[in-house]
Each structure stands twice: as C-alpha cells, then as structure tokens.
Image (cartoon, grey):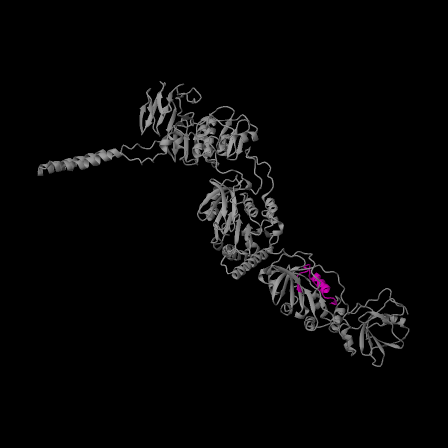
Amino acid sequence: MDITIEGVGDVELEPGTTLGETLRLMRAPAAVWCGGARLDASHRAGVPPLVAGALLSTRPGRASVPPTGPHLRVVAGPDAGGVVEAVRDAVVVGRDGPLGLDDPRLSRRHLALDAAGRARDLGSRNGTMLVRGGRRRRLGRLRRRLRHGDLLLAGGSALRWTDPGAASEEPRPPTRHAPRLGPMLAGLAGGAAGGLALGVATGRWELAAVALAAPLAFAVAAAARARVPPEPVPVGSERLADLPLPVAVRGDAVSAQAAARALALGHAAALPAPLDEPWTRWLARRLDERAVTLTAGAAPSEARTVLDVGDGTVAVDGRVEPWQPSLVSAATAETLARAHASRGHVGLPREVRWAELSRPEPSPGRLLATLGRGDDGDVTLDLDADGPHLLVAGTTGAGKSALLETLVTGLAHDHAPTRLAIALIDLKGGAGLGACAALPHSRGLLTDLEPSAARRALLGLAHELRARKELLASAGSTSWTDLGSRGGDDEPPPRLLVVIDEFQELGGMDPGFLPELARLAAQGRSLGMHLVLATQRPAGVVTPDIRANVATVIALRTASAAESQDLLGDASAAALPADAPGRAIVATGTVRRTMQAALPLAQRRAPARKRGASGSPGPSLASAAAARWDPADRPSALWLPALRPGAVPPPGALGWCDLPTERAQEPLVWDPRAGALAIVGPRGSGRSTALDAVAAALPGCVRLPTDAREAARTLALVRRSGAAALLVDDVERVCAALDPLLRGASEALEALARDVPVALAGGPAWGARWASRAGLRIVMSGLDRVEQTLWGVPSALLGLSPEPGRGVAVTSSGAAECRIGPATPTPCRVLVRPLVCPPDLDAPAVGVIGDDAAPWRPGPGSLLVVAAPGTDPAPALHALARARTEVTVSARVDPAAATVVIVDPTPARLRELGVDAPPGVAEPLPPVGRVAVLHGRELSAAQLRLDAKA
C-alpha cells in the first residue's frame, strides 16, 4: 500500500508494518498525525486511518480517508469535493473556518449541522434550500433533520447528505409513478353509480356499499404506493461518471481544468497526459489520450459530450441540459483521490517479489506454484486441480519471461529434484529461461540456436513418457497419482514440468512438433507431466488439440483485443496497462483473477521504502533454489546434448551417431562385411575427412591414387593385395579420368566392391545406384532435400544445417544423425608408386620401373628398342646409353629378344604391336621418357631419366 509521509514523500508500506518501524526506516519520527487522529507507534498499516492513500504529518490536518459516518459532500459549486462530517459539536458551513468553502455566494457563516444530522440556516444572505423528493423548501432557523439523499442548495454550492447507515439498510423500492387522476375518478364514479343502481333495484343498500368499497380500496392503495419518494436527481459531479467519452470541457483555463478534475474523479481515472497533475498518481486507471480536451471555443467534432462551465450546460450527442458546474481544486482533488486509494481503487502493486508472497506448505502429491499477488491475496495454482497444462501469453514487454522464471524457480525452490524434474525449451536463444538451466532439477535446455535439436527434445519426451507407461504397467497402476499414493519402497518418478517459451516457433523448426506435442499433452495427466506453453502470438497457434488439455490461461497484456478474445473470451487482456509489466489475468476452469506477477527474487524488500525504489534485488530465486538442494540429486537428462565437432571417437569408429529415440550416442562404425561405404556430400562438407577416419579405423587401407594410370594399376592389383579397404575420394573425377584407360570405370568399381571392401566419397550425382548397394551411407549436410531423399535420408532428418563433418548415417536398419570425428593422420598402403626419377637416383640406373618405381639397371645383354613410325627414339637411346649395353632399334617386337623397350607406349600402339598390356601400364598420352619394358612375358611401365648422357 502507498501512503505519504510529510517531509519524505510517497512511501510503499507493507500491510501490518507498525507506525514506529515505518517512521524509523523512513527517518521521519514526528509524523504521527493522520488527518485529525494521533496514531500510536504500535498502530499497524492497513488499520484505519493508516490505509492506502493516508497522509502522515506532524500536526492535525484534513482527513485523507473517506468518512464512515453521516456527512455532507459538496457535489457542485466553485469549491466542489469538500466533506462536512456530523461530529459531536455543531459545525458551521460557510466561507470562514477550517472547513470554509471558496464560494463567494456563501455567507461567512451560512448554515449549521449538528451531530444528530440536523441542519439550520444561520441567517444567511441568500438563504438555504432543502431539496427532498423533487420538492424544494426553504431551510429556516429551526433545526431540521436531514434524510439520506437530501440536497442542500447554499449560495452557488450544492451539498448532498449521505448517511451510510441508512444507505446500507434494505434497498429502496423502485420508483413508482403517481396514478393518473382521470382513470381513478372514472373508476370511482362507475363504482358509485353501480352501487346506487343496485340499492334502488333491490332495496338492499348494504350491497350498494360493498360495490362502492372495492374501487375505493383500489384507489387508496394506488395513492399509497405513489407516495414512495423518487430517487434523488444527480447534481453536479454526480452526473459525470455516466457521461459518454470523449468529453470536451469548455470555459476559461482555470474553470475548465477544475471541471476536468471533477470528471476524472467521477470516472476514477487519471486525466490524459497533457492534463495530468500530481494528485492523479492515486488513481489506478488513466483515461485515453483524447478522452478529455479543454477548449475556450468550439468543441472538437469527436466529442460526444460537451461540458460548458460558463453556460452551466451539458450536451450529450447534441442534446443540451442544464448542469450545475462542479469545480474541484487541486488540493481537494488530491484528498478525494487519496480516498479512492483507501477504498482499494489504486489496485494491484506495481512490483512484488516472490520472497514477499505467502506460500502454502508443500505437501506430497501436490504441485503448488505461487505466482503473484491479486486483489484478494496471493495467487497460487495447483497444477493438478488447475492443470495439468498451462498457457501463458503476452506481447513483448508484458513480463512473460519473468513470470515463467518465477513459475519454474519457485516450484524448484519448494520441491526437491527427486520430486520435480524440469525440461526447458527456450526459443529465444536461451535468454528467457537460461537462468533456470543451472537448477539441479533441470533435465535439458533446448534453444533455437540449434533448430534440429527440436526433434531430439521431442523424442526425449516421448522416450520418458514411454518409460513411465512401462513403469505404471509393471506396477499395475493406472496413473502417476495412483502410483504415488500406494507408498512402498519404490518412489514414483518425479513430476515432469516441460516449459516451452515461444512455442509457436516450433512449427518453423519442425513441422511435426506441434501435432506430436498435442499427442503428448493428452497423456500428460496420467503420467505426471505438465506442459507450460508460452507465446507472444496466441492466435492460430494454440490448436484445438492442445487447447483441449489446457485448463488454465495466464494472459498478460496482449497486442490486440482479438488475441485477448481468443484467450479469455473478451478484450480484458488487451486493456491491461502497458506501464505495469507482469500484470496478468489468471483464468482457471472456475475462477478468474487479476494479479501482479512476482519477480523471481529471493530477498524481501524493506517493509517501508520510497515509492518506486526497489532497493537491492538481492539473490535471484534461481540461485536460491539451486543452493537449497544437493546437486547430486540432479535427474538424468531427457535428451543428450547435440553432437558437437571435435568429439574423439573410440578406436575403430569413424565418429558418433546420435540416437535420441534411445537417449544414447554410439560410435559410428563401418563393417565392411555389410557392404561398401558411400560418403555423399558437396565439396567442403567433410567427405575427405570421413575417408581419413576410415583409414584411421581400418589399418591397411589402400587409397586410390589421383593419377589415372596409377589408379588403373591399383585397381588391377588391389584384389590380391589383402588390403583392408580401398578408399576412393572424389569418385566422379576418378571415374572420368579412368574411362580412357579402363572403359566402364564405374562398373569396374562396382565389380571390385564384391571382392574388396570399398569406401567411396563424392557428390550426390555420381552414382545413385550405390544408395541401394552400400552397406553404410553417410550423407553429409549441405545437400538439398531432394538429393538427401534420393540417398535414403528420412524426412525427420532432412535439412540439417550445413557444417563440415555433420551428416546422416543410413543403413538397412535405420538412420541417425552423425558426426565424423577428428582422425589421426594414418598412412595408407601404396600398391603403385609414381614413376618419377628421384634426384638422388644412383648413376648406373637408367630410370625407374614397375609398380614400386624401383631403380632400373638393365643387365648384360642387348636391348631391343621398338619405335613405331613417327616416333622419335632419340631420348630413349640417350637414356639407355648409361646401361652400356648393346641397343638395337626396330619397328617391330622380336619375340626372341630378352628385353624389349617400347617407346611412347600408348594402349593403341601396344595393340598394334601385338603386346597384351595389363591395366595401368600404358596411357593415352604418356609423358616424355615413358617406356614399356617387356621382359619375357611380364610387361612393366618405366620412366627413363632424361638428364642421362651417353
């Protein structure tokens, strides 16, 4: 509650705080007067007169609380708003004295009022009129007792007599109109004529009297009913509360402002900002910006009502009626506004902390959350009786994040981790619920920084509910509540609170999430799960399936009346004040309350403090809740963290597979016996890294060389090499380069894969048929959804964000997201070495020869150099001169020659010479110095050193 202390200013005061403690905290020891009452140091806040709006001062003053006994209230005139109470001694109303009114038409001592509610005129110059039941009569010098609702007209002022005791008696019967005289007389005449005729005709005059008595009785009863006095006619300020807005007040600046004050008090709402004055801080509401305008000339065309102070008229929609102006001074307006505050019109506090709330004691089997303060006390929700699921909605700046944090951390503070587990899905990057993630109750935090993790969270929830179903079935229980009530040694699993902030974003992250969430929500009550769904835009995202399981709505301020209508059935949430974050309407199945949501702070404020000064926030509720419980009681996570780059796999594994359905992460292993390994992805996606991981996992692999001749020769040798696997990188380019040497290179690879384990890496278009033949497919991220589908990626895993080393592992038994681990560089076996003469090649050697590129030193004997027409044998002859052996040149191969050197050996030339060349010995465009050496039946490729001198 808010009060004012003289010399200090406005103060926020907790109910129950004593006056002595208040003055000590605010350092105002002498302010012990509240109006005309002197208060003791033990007087508690909340006990009249120390109520909201009270003014504490160092000396007696005007009362700031509404009178409780009979009194006169000035409802019209130049100094409206004043109050004259009927006290023990007679009081004088006039221009003089402590209760003097600023009305020049009043006499200095105009009339007197005693404690019995009797008034008399004191010989005033203008006299006093008493208005009762629509009749006026002059009030003389003799005292006349006033009745509730009487009006006294004195000078230019009108004073209404109010007797709370009489007003609280049995309600006034409705006003009845006086009977119409003509029909009544006609009825009496007819009855009299009928009675007379009956008496003359029968001679029995007693019958005539009866005939006359009936209409006479009806007439008397009607006249008696007509004597019920009518309701008092509203005068001055009494007419202002029902005037339709907008209102234009016409008159000079001072008078118009005074009438505007009366209008604001009549509506119990502060004036719009341009007309605002300090006293309006005691009113809870504020009129719209254009609700009241002051003018000295023509009224704005938007105004439905025009109050003309100068002419004394009020015009509503063009209909003009007389009006006695009610002009209120700023000082009187503050007194009346404080009186409004004392009656509770100030409303809810602007700020309240969780530590200041009164919370029920936690009880087994119940999940109670105290969220804030309402008009009738603190607001507590029972997630069983008011749930099981909640919907929280509010626009930006309405206080939704703070409310969610209070809900989560408050429950965590009052319930042990063995009783409550919390899963958090914060689609604002973790900014809203991040403080709750450190609670020992937390079982996982999902943010929108990792969109694909939405599926992991959903599968984790489904796994948890499936486990709970199995537990209930094994225990023979029908629900979580039934299982908990049985007792025994086995504790039921903790309640599971799932909080989803901005849950409308889930549809964009995963289109299947919301339907699946609705399915899980339907199972929540029996399995001990509670959903808290929070959104800024409730319209259209709260599906009927979800709404069917949501029993409580917490509506903070909404952006539009339509959104409020969708939540509550009316526009009240859109009308919540924008300058009061945390103001909310809580609607359960049976109760609807307005509250101020508590801030998640674990330290109370001082019981007396300057208004608007929060003081030190102290520890957060999240830190207090975390410190209260043993971290060792933290439950297991509902879903494991997403796979991150850099995680080292165990020996023999390529990386890690994520299995959220099983709440597990297992090594990614390729079993060559199951078939080939196909790695598909765009360049830069980590294809080569995956092959490096294969080489590290399977010692003894052979990597296919990039040189076409060496690649073809390697393919010819790998079958009998005993290699652990053949690794082929950039398979599209390799096949294109091999085709001139090895027609049908793709088919050759497929045939080879039947005999040798093959791991291939390439783009999505190089051979989709491998999708059905491979034992393991790793589809790297970065492909479009169609390409991923062609390679067997299920719809749930489509569209992973591109990241090197990230992909989907697909086998015949299923698919899972995977991460390729960092591989230690491992040398592969080399079956064919490049034919390059090293700089340190020894002098006797003429070049290098064979698959091992060994130094070639021709032995004794002769060499036959075969050079087809058009081929220059000179470079070869110069190189072979180092052999110091006999060299013969020919155009044909002599089968009798021990060693034949064929210059410029292309596949076509070898066929022309009748030489059967194995793959990879010849190539279409051999480099200078390349020769084929036929030694017996073995044909080998050789490279002659070109720097040799004869």
In this rendered view, identify the residue nearer to me: 699 or 940: 699
Q: Position of residue 772 (x, y in %)?
A: 62, 69
| 280 vs 403: above or below | above
Q: Quadrant of residue 149?
A: top left
Q: Position of residue 638 (x, y in %)?
A: 59, 55
In the image, is residue 432 part of the stretch drawn in magenta?
no
How many numbered circles are shown? 0
* Residue 787 in view: no
Q: Quadrant of the C terminus?
A: bottom right
Is 514 on the left or on the right of 895, as rendered?
left
Q: Position of residue 232 (x, y in %)?
A: 34, 31
Q: Position of residue 425 (x, y in %)?
A: 57, 51
In this rendered view, identify the residue nearer to me: 575 or 384: 384
In this rendered view, identify the residue nearer to me: 170 or 135: 170
| 675 vs 380: above or below | below
Is 160 on the left or on the right of 902, as rendered?
left
Question: What span is in magenta?
Answer: 679-703
Is 352 on the left or on the right of 937, as rendered?
left
Direction front: furthest residue: 488
In this rendered view, identify the residue nearer to me: 466 or 362: 362
* Residue 627 in view: yes
In the image, is residue 700 part of the stretch drawn in magenta?
yes
Q: Quadrant of residue 671?
A: bottom right
| 460 vs 286: above or below | below
